[in-house]
Image (cartoon, rainbow, N blue to C red):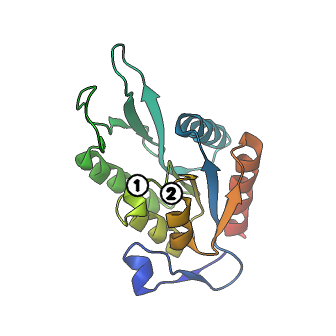
Amino acid sequence: MNSVTSSPAATSGSCACEPQSGAMPLGVMVYENSLEADDLLAQVAAVLAAEGYRLGGAVQSSVHRPGRRKCDMYLRDLLSGEEILISLDRGNEARGCRLDPDAFARVSLWGEQALSAGVDLLVVNKFGKEEAQGRGLRPLIAEALIAGIPVMLGVSTLNLPDFEAFAGELAMRLPPQHEAILSWCRRAVRQRAE
């Protein structure tokens, strides 16, 4: 099993974790279309859950409403199955961030519960704007890596430079392809068990 030495940077949300042996299991799917990426991670999580893997983290779904330019965004906890709305309805003309900060507190709690439960794999829907700015689920990702729990996440090409600054050499870049991501997840869990 890989283990990580914690550092002040790692616990503050950056990822200066240093693997003691081998590479830390951090898989990243780089994408351009977030809706397609959300669907792909949800499909992969469903297959892994059906195979008996204990998953933590969350996957996103988007629901379009008639008369609205923007969709409603939901996150589903992979451990409990609970689902919450994470977007605020600010009207069609609103600009800027629509994420509900209270929802993020809930999602962070889900992640903490997953780590405490000793899940096989943590799935993080995306390393988005919040994570790029050092907030959101960034501390949870670092905490999972320190605990030796493999992490699979998505990142847009827009946020890729911030992710690379966070992860350094610890991430394995994966194409947005079902089989490639499934294969990496299975291998990461198996390597941790060994």
Per the image, label 1 sits on a secondary structure element best described as helix
In the image, residue 57 lies at what x, y percent?
A: 47, 51
Residue visible at 51% across and 75% down? 146
Residue visible at 24% across and 27% down? 91
Q: CA distance from mark 2 to mark 1?
A: 7 Å
- Nearer the N terminus, badge 2 or badge 1? 1
Give left or right: position of 178 versus 170.
right
Give left or right: position of 111 versus 145.
left
In the image, residue 136 lies at what x, y percent?
A: 36, 58
Q: Is residue 11 above or below residue 108?
A: below
Residue 1 appears in which quarter of the rendering? bottom right
Q: Amino acid at mark 2?
A: Asn
Residue visible at 25% across and 30% down? 89
**Crowd rating for badge 1 (residues with CA inside 10 Å; few <14, some 14–19, many 20+):** some
Are the two marked residues, 2 and 1, in contact with CB atoms closer than 8 angstroms? Answer: yes
In the image, residue 28 lies at what x, y percent?
A: 62, 57
Q: Amino acid at mark 1?
A: Lys
In the image, residue 169 lies at what x, y percent?
A: 64, 75
Q: Which residue is mark 2?
A: 159
Residue 137 appears in the figure: no
Q: Nearer the viewer, residue 63 or 107?
A: 63
Residue 46 appears in the figure: yes
Q: Is residue 40 above or below residue 146?
A: above
Per the image, label 2 sits on a secondary structure element best described as loop
Residue 86 appears in which quarter of the rendering? top left
Residue visible at 69% across and 75% down? 23
Q: Nearer the viewer, residue 189 or 22?
A: 22
Q: Is residue 130 above or below residue 22?
A: above
Q: Which residue is mark 1?
A: 129
Q: Is residue 160 above or below residue 14?
A: above
